[in-house]
């Protein structure tokens, strides 16, 4: 009920401003509509998107599962306020999957807010971002789920990502030569994920990232979009390295996963995560590679008497390789290989290998597409599984 009231209020506000504002109707995929203040002192673009997913999983033990759901349904607002140098972004998640994760640390409330950030270009090539949003971690996570090459992200992302958090980011870029671009990011965050209202329980999370683009920027920010939809006419390459230090972390996957509870409160340990990733595109061909490595000062949670609680930091390594080729008729064939190797002596989990073959039809780029893929998961000493997925994606 609260959500319905909120959406009605937003709609009424938008309609009430139409008479007093200049309304620019963008083309499909560029937002539902744009609002521009009469004095051009502010703008607002309103967007909506959804992903409808059907999937089936067959395991070796004859356990089968089929599901249909609205995987994502989101409402987005962005623009600038007062000056084009002060931008903002708000993204709300409306599907059950988007809202999941309510706990005492989020006031037992649905987690509507995905992004809520102010972005201030305060001096030349320097920007400071403040609020809740994606941390500068692995490339695959920073790529919007609306712009993915396959139905969803890889196992590497689900096991190692540092996702969203609340804090600030300092960003800068410069040119070494006419074409060689360098981008730097430093982030300080709370360290417990998004929509946390009860905290800070542990320390803080510090993330640094550097990106090298020796052949210049990609077309339309293509280094953070799946597939080479722009068909780059010259080779484009991006190399990124991120290092994340979560001081006195209280969750078992840095700022993600489950809280580690002891008889005296929360277990705290330093967790470090390294990401190395690359993106290459040329004339319809694309290649993305990622490596992740997580370690912890003491990964096994213990009570005050030294007994193990059963909570364990998910330390280990992951590798993801993904490639695709876009045909002239906007069909794309893609393939992905993912290897996950958590430290078995600590986590007790066996290595995993997943192979994925994907097929996509881009009707209007990423804004309107149909994607399907089939994956084979091999678990050493465990149950292998086969997964098929079909997804429709529309983005206004």
Image: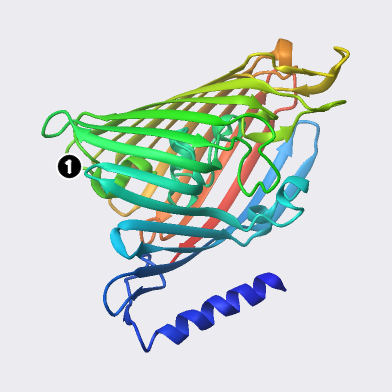
Q: Quadrant of residue 283?
A: top left
Which residue is nearer to you in this view: 330 or 168? 168
Q: Quadrant of the C terminus?
A: bottom left
Q: Which residue is depicted at the point 63% across and 58% down?
A: 112
Q: In the rendering, at what x and y percent does residue 45 appear?
A: 39, 68
Location of residue 202 with respect to 374 vertically, above or below? above
Location of residue 88 with respect to 290 vertically, above or below? below
Location of residue 189 with respect to 77 vertically, above or below? above
Q: In the rendered view, does 58 fall on the left or right side of 20?
A: right
Q: In the rendering, at what x and y percent does residue 372 appear?
A: 52, 49
Q: In the rendering, at what x and y percent does residue 81 appear?
A: 36, 64
Residue 227 seen in this snapshot: no
Which residue is nearer to you in this view: 309 or 201? 201
Q: In the rendered view, does 77 fall on the left or right side of 293?
A: left
Residue 204 seen in this snapshot: yes
Q: Which residue is depicted at the point 63% across and 49% down?
A: 195
SS for callout 1: loop
Q: In the rendering, at what x and y percent does residue 270 appear?
A: 62, 20
Q: Which residue is depicted at the point 69% across and 14% down?
A: 298
Q: Quadrant of residue 111?
A: bottom right
Which residue is nearer to you in this view: 151 or 119? 119
* Disc 1 packing (10 Å; few <14; some 14–19; many ≥20): few
Q: Quadrant of the N terminus?
A: bottom right
Which residue is nearer to you in this view: 39 or 23? 39
Q: How is the image coloured?
A: rainbow
Q: Which residue is depicted at the point 48% across and 44% down?
A: 150
Residue that numbered label 1 is attached to: 233
Q: In the rendered view, does 395 fall on the left or right side of 390?
A: left
């Amino acid at each position: 009920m609260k959500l319905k009231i909120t959406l009605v209020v937003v709609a009424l506000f938008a309609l009430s401003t139409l008479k007093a504002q200049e309304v620019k109707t963008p083309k499909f995929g560029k937002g539902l509509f744009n609002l521009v203040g009469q004095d051009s002192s502010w703008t607002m673009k309103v967007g909506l998107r959804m992903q409808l997913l059907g999937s089936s999983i067959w395991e070796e033990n004859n356990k089968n599962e089929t599901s249909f759901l609205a995987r994502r349904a989101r409402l987005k607002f962005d623009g600038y306020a007062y000056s084009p140098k002060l931008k903002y972004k708000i993204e709300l998640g409306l599907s059950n999957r988007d809202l999941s994760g309510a706990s005492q640390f989020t006031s037992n409330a649905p987690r509507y807010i995905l992004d809520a950030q102010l972005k201030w270009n305060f001096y030349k090539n320097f920007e400071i971002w403040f609020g809740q949003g994606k941390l500068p971690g692995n490339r695959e996570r920073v790529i919007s789920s609306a712009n993915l090459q396959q139905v969803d992200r890889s196992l590497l992302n689900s096991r190692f990502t540092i996702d969203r958090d609340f804090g600030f980011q300092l960003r800068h870029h410069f040119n070494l030569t006419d074409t060689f671009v360098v981008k730097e990011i430093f982030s300080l965050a709370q360290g417990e994920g998004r929509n946390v209202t009860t905290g800070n329980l542990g320390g803080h999370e510090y993330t640094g990232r550097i990106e090298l683009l020796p052949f210049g920027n990609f077309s339309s920010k293509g280094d953070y979009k799946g597939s080479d939809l722009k068909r780059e006419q010259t080779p484009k390459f991006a190399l990124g390295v991120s290092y994340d230090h979560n001081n006195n972390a209280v969750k078992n996957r840095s700022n993600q996963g489950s809280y580690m509870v002891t008889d005296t409160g929360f277990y705290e340990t330093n967790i470090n995560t390294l990401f190395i990733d690359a993106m290459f595109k040329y004339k319809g061909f694309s290649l993305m590679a990622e490596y992740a490595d997580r370690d912890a000062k003491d990964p096994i949670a213990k009570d005050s008497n030294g007994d193990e609680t059963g909570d364990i930091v998910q330390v280990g390594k992951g590798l993801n390789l993904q490639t695709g080729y876009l045909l002239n008729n906007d069909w794309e064939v893609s393939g992905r290989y993912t290897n996950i190797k958590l430290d078995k002596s600590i986590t007790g989990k066996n290595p995993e290998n997943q192979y994925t073959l994907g097929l996509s039809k881009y009707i209007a780029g990423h804004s309107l597409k149909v994607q399907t893929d089939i994956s084979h998961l091999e678990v050493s000493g465990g149950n292998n599984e086969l997964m098929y997925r079909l997804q429709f994606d529309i983005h206004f």
